[in-house]
Amino acid sequence: MPLTEAFERRFLFVTGKGGSGKTLVSATAARESARQGKRTLWVEMTEKPAGARLFADYRPDYKPRQIDENLWGMNLSIGPAIEEYLSILFPIPLLSKLIARNSLFQVITAAMPGIDSLIPLGKLWHELGRRDKGSPVWDRIVLDAPATGHALAMLRLPQTVLGLVETGNLAERTREIDEVLADQKLTGILVVTTAEELSIDETVELVTEVHEHTAYRVHALICNAMCPDIGQAQGHEFNQWLQGDSPSKDVPTSNKIDQAFRDHLSRLEARRKQQLELLPRLSDLSVALHQCPWMPGISDRQRLIRLSQVLQDA
Amino acid sequence: MNTDESDSYRILIVGGSGGVGKTSISAALALQACLDGHRTLLLTIDPARRLSTAMGIDRIGAEATDITEHLEAAGHSPRGSLHAMMLDAKRTLDRIVEKHARTPDQKDRILNNRLYRNVSTRLGGSQEYAAMQCLADIADSAEYDRIIVDTPPSAHALDFLDAPRRLRALFDSKLVKVFISFGSRAGRGFFRVSDLLFKALERLTGSQAIAELAEFFETAESLFEPFNARSERAEQVLHDPSSAFLVVTGPNQDQLEQAHDFKMALDEMDMQVTRFIVNRHLEPRLEQPVPVVTPDDETPDLEARIKRWGSMLEKMAHDQANLIANLSEQSGLEVTAVPQMDEDIHSLSGLARLAGHL
C-alpha cells in the first residue's frame, strides 16, 4: 500500500530537528516508493551519511548507487557537486577539475554565503530534469534535507538570491529552483519533529517562517517517538496498577520486578501525557499531522520497516 | 556543582551535539554557581520559551541583564549574582562594525550592504562565529568570576569550533586583497589564474554577487583587523588554563560515541575537558535485566503489554549503564549521569533539581 498522501509528490524535501528521526522518515519514504515500482533516488546531505546503517550492502557516495530494486541512494556533498557543475559550464574536464580543486577557489566557495544551499538545490533540479530516452530518469527523489536551521536557509535562498541579482546565469538557475519548490504538485515539504517543547518551538517557527516568508508550503508534519499507550482500553485497571493496587489476579503486583516495571511505566505514562498536551501546538498549524511511535530496542533497519507500516495506516 | 570544576575554572563551555539538553544544563550550572556565591554570567542560546520565562530571561537580549532579583522573587537566596544574555548573532556582529567603523558613512554602508546582512543573519555558521566573538568580549569583563557558555545547536559538536574557522577564511587578508584587486580590475579581461577562478565563481554566484562582495571587502577592509583580533582572543580564551569544556551527551550508543569523538578532538586541539554529562539516562531498577518478551505492540492484553514495556525499559537502562561505564573507562574522565526527569525542565525548581544532579 502506498504511503499517505503527503508522500505522493515527485520531489520530497524532508527536514526536522536534529535527532528527531528525519533520516529514518526520508529513507522510509524512499524505500516504500521503490516498492511501489517507482524509480527512486534517496539523497542524503551530510558529512556522515547514515545510509549504511539503514540499508544492507549500501555505501553512500556522491555517485548514485543502487540500494535495492528501483532504489538508488547518493550523498550530495558540496565539493563533488561544484566539480560536476563546473564540468557542465566548462566542458574541458581537466580545466574544471583544476578550478574545483584549487585551494583558493575552495576557500572562497566554502565561505561564500548560500553556496552550501544553492549547489545542492541546483544538483537536485538537475536530477529531477534528467531524462533517458524521453522519460525521466527518476520517478521520485527523496531528500533527507539538513536540520531545521540549514533547511530554512535553503528554502529562503531563492528569494534571497533573486533579491540580490536579477539577471545572468545565477538568477536563471535560481528561478528554475524556485519554480520546483513552489510547484505544490511536484514538491512536498515534510517536517519531522518530536512532541517535546524545544522541537515543537523549532517546528512551529520553521512552518511559520516558510508559510509567511516564502511561496512554499509545508505539506505534512510527522511527529515521531510518541510514547505507547499501554493502558489503552483498560485505563482504569492500568491506573490502579500504576498506583500499586492489584486490580485483578491477572496483573502482577507486589514483587521487585513488578515495582521496577511500575517505576518505568509511570514515567512513560507521564511523558505520554505531556506529549499529548503539546500536540495541539502542532495541530494548530493546519498542516496534516502524522504520529509515529517510539521504537526502542530494535535496529534502524527494523524501524524502517515498522515506520512504513505506520505511515501507510495513517 | 562539581567542586574541582567550580574551583579551577572561570569559564565553562557547555558543548555537545544538538538536542541533548545543553541549554538546560548550562542554565542549571549557572543557577548553582550563583547560589554558591559566584558573580555568574550565563550566555544562553535560544532556550525553550517556558524555561526562559521561568528564568526571567524571555525579554532579555544581547546585553547582559541582572536576573538575581528574579531568583530572589522565586524564593531562592542567592549568595552571588546571575546575569544572563541571549546570543544574538546579528547584534553581536553589528556592534563590532559600529565600534570599529572609521566614519558614520562607512558604518552605514557596511550595515546596509546586502552581503553583510546575509552573512550576519542567514549564513550557516554565523551563530557559532558570533558566539566566539561574544565569548572574547565577556571573558575580558572583570564583573564575573564564573561564566557559563551554552553553544549553538548543531548536528555535530565540533561545528562550534569549525564554523567560525570557516567563516574567518572569508576575512583572511590575502583573500581580501585578491578580491579587492578583482573588484578594481573588473571588465579588463581575464589573464591570470585567479581570473579563471573568478570566471568560474561568477558562473556559480553571479557577477553582481561578486561585485557586491568586492564592494563589501573594499568598504570593510579596515574592520577585518578587529574581527580577526576578536577571533584570536576567543581562541586564547578557549585555550586558557581557566577555561574548560563540559561535554553533554545523550545516553544512546551513537550519542556516546559522538561525545567520545568530540572529547578526542578537543584533546587534539589542546582544549581542556572537565567531564562528560550524560543527560536523561534511564536508571536501572533491578540488579539484572529481565528477559525482554516478544515485542508485539498490538496485543490488547494488559499484563503482556506491561511486561513487554517494563522489560524493554529495564533492558535499555542496563544497556545505557554499561555504555556509560565504558565511556568513563575509555576516556579516563569523570562521567556525570543525569537521570531522566519526570517532566521537561521549564521552571526554576526544575533547574534546581537538575543542578542537584550535576
Image: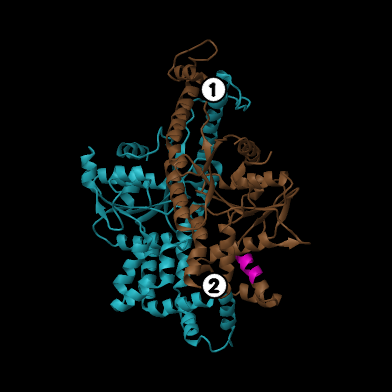
Q: Residues within 10 Å of mark 2 (few under 14, many from 20)?
A: many
Classify B140 as above or below B223.
above
Is A81 magenta? The answer is: yes
Residue nearest the observer in this picture, A5 or B275? A5
Q: Of the numbered discs in the image, which one, if any, rests on residue B205? A: 2
Task: Name the dominant secondary structure of the magenta segment.
Answer: helix
Query: Which percent across, then down, holds residue B3?
Result: 33, 44
Is residue B32 visible from the viewing direction of this image?
Answer: no
**Which amino acid, by three-letter code, is at mark 1?**
Ile
Splitting the image into 4 quarters, where does residue A222 fall?
top right
Magenta residues span A78-85
Q: Which residue is mark 1?
A: B306
Q: Residue furthest top?
A: A249
> What kind of element bears circle 1?
helix
Residue nearest the observer in this picture, B11 or A121? A121
Q: Are marks 1 and 2 on the same chain?
A: yes
Sequence-first tag of 1 and 2:
2
